[in-house]
Amino acid sequence: MLRRATAAVIMLAFMVQLAGCYKNSTAYVSTSTAQNGKDNRFIGVTTHDAEYVRFDAPAVINAGRVIGRVHGAPYEIDVDDVQYFWVKRREVDGTKTAIAVLGAALGAVVIAGSLGGGSDPPQRTTTTQAESCPFVYSWDGSQWVFDAEPYGGAVSRGLERDDYTELEHLRPDDGLYRLMVRNELEETQHTNLAELWVADHSPDISLASDVFGKLYTLRDPQPPISATNGQGHDLLPWLRADDKLIWEPQPVAGADPSMREEVVLTFAKPPGAKRVKLITRAATAFWGSHMILEMLELRGSRLDQWYADVDNGMAESMALYQWNLREELYALKVSVEEPDGWAVRGMIPGGGPFITEKRVVVLDVSRVAGDEIRIRLRPPIGFWALNAFALDASPDEAIHMTKLAPKEAHDADGNDLRSVLTQLDDAYHVMPEIGDVAYLTFDVPAAAPSMKRTVFLHTSGWYRVHVDASGTPNVAGLEQIFDVPGGAARLAAERYAEWLAASSSSVGSEWQ
C-alpha cells in the first residue's frame, strides 16, 4: 500500500512538471512540494471506483492521503485510490492559472484548462516527456484556452498528415477568431497549412469529423448499454459519457502474451440500421506518446538514415503503416460482431495525449443479427486512453460551411506567415524551440439566422523530435518491436517499470 501510494505521488510530481511545459508554471515540483501543496492546488480527484470528487477548496496530500472538504464536510482518500488528480497550479509569471488533469498512478495526463493572456512563461526542459506536436490555443473572448494538438505522430516529413479538430472554446472577438500556436515540447514543428472551417447548421444537431475531414451530423447519439473488459469488469461508468472519467490501464505486463486489453461495447441496434456513426473520444495515452521518443532512440546513429528512407521512399512508409496496423499502437481497429465472428469495420485514429478528440468512425452493421450491436476494441497496454463512445444512426443533414484562410498570421517577431500557411506546398512555418509561437486571426463570417455554429481547425504538418542519435543502434530492441507481435507494448511496460523503479528510489525519507 505505502509503496503504491509513494509511486502515485512520484507520478503526480512528474506529471505536474510535465504540465509546466504546456503553459503552466515552469517551476519544478518536487515530491515534498506535491505533499504539502505549496504550489499545487488539488481541486478534485477521480477515483478508481469511477467517481469524480471536487473539493470545496484546494486539498493537500499528507502521509499518503488526500485531505480536503466536500460540501462542507471533511473528506480523505488514500493516494493509492486516486486515478487522476485535477490540479490547479499557481502561476509564477503573473498569468492566470491553468487546470491540468494529472494521471497519478497511470503515467497519463490530459490537459483541460485555460490560461490568461499575460506574459509568456520562460522556457523549461524535462528529462521525460510526451510527444505531441504544436499546441493550439483558442481565444474565448477573455483568455487563451488549450484547444487542439494537431497531426500527432507525424514524426517525419514523409509522414506529414492533415488534421481536423473541433475548436470547442473558440469565440468571436471584435469580428475576429484568434488562435495562438506554440511549441512547448522538445521538438521542431513544421506547419504547412492552417485554415478554419466554419459550419452553420441546425441547432438540434452537433457535428464531428472523421480522420479524413468529412463532417457528419449527429442528431441522436446513444451511449452504450454495457461495456466490459476481458476480465468482465464493468467499464460503463468510464466510457458512457464525455467527462472526467477516462479509462487508461497502467502499462504493466500481465499473463497475456499479446500485451493487450479487450473492451466490448454493446449498443441498442437502431431499427433497420445498415450504417451507423460511432462517436469516439479517445487519445494516445501519455506513456504511449512517450514511447515514440523511446523507439526513435533505439535507432541511434542510424536514425537520420531512417528519416531519409521514410521521407524519400514508399517502402519504409508502407512498412511503418503495416506495422502500426498490426500492433494498433497509434490506430485502433474497431471490430463488429457478426454471425461469423468479429469483423474489422473501422479504425480509431490516434491523437493527443493531452486532448481526447471527438471523431466519427462509420461502421457497416448490415450483417449484425439481433437487436444489439457489439463492438470490440483490443488496445495494447499503455498506448490508449478511452473516454467515451456513442452511436448515431441518423441520416446526415445539410450544413453550410465556409473555409477561411488567416487574415493575419505572424510570429513573435512580427514576421508575416500567411504565405506559408495558406496552401499545401513545400513552404512551412518552422518552430524549432520551446516557446516559439505564431498568432493567427480570421474574419468571422456572418452567422445564418437561427443556426448553430461549429468551427474546425484544418492543419497539415509534421514534427521532428529532439533525440540524441549518437548512440549505437539497438538492433535487438528494434527486432523486438518490429518482428515480434506485442513487442512494442512489452517494451513500453519494461520502460515504465524501469522509470517507476528509478523514481521510487529517489523518494526522500519523508515518504518512508
Image: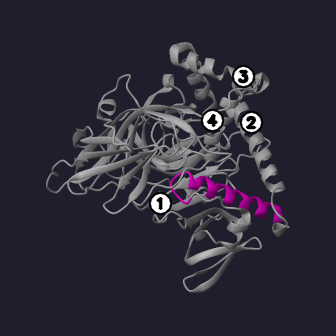
Q: Which residue is mark 3?
A: 483
Whether pointer 3 and pointer 1 mark residues with C-beta atoms closer than 8 Å, the reply is no
Mark 4 lies on a secondary structure that is: helix
Say which residue appears at 81% left-offset and 56% top-offset: 506
Which of the two labelled residues, at mark 4 and mark 2, occupies the earlier sequence position?
A: 4
Q: Position of residue 73 (x, y in %)?
A: 60, 86
Q: Dot 3: within a 10 Å radius of its alpha carbon, few (fewer than 14), some, or many (20 or more) residues?
A: few
| Place of residue 359 in the rendered image (x, y in percent of width and height, measured from the top left) | 43, 43
Above-or-below relation of 242 to 489: below
Q: Which residue is mark 2?
A: 491
Say which mark, if any, is on residue 292: 4
Give the number of callouts. Answer: 4
Tell which circle, 3 or 2, labels the residue nearer the N-terminal end.
3
| Local SS, label 3 | helix
Instruction: Characterize the magenta stretch by its predominant secondary structure.
Output: helix
Bounds of the magenta segment: 1-25
Q: On the image, numbered disc 1 is attached to which residue?
A: 113
Front residue of 83 and 220: 83
Q: Earlier in the sequence, mark 3 or mark 4?
A: 4
Q: Amino acid at mark 2?
A: Leu
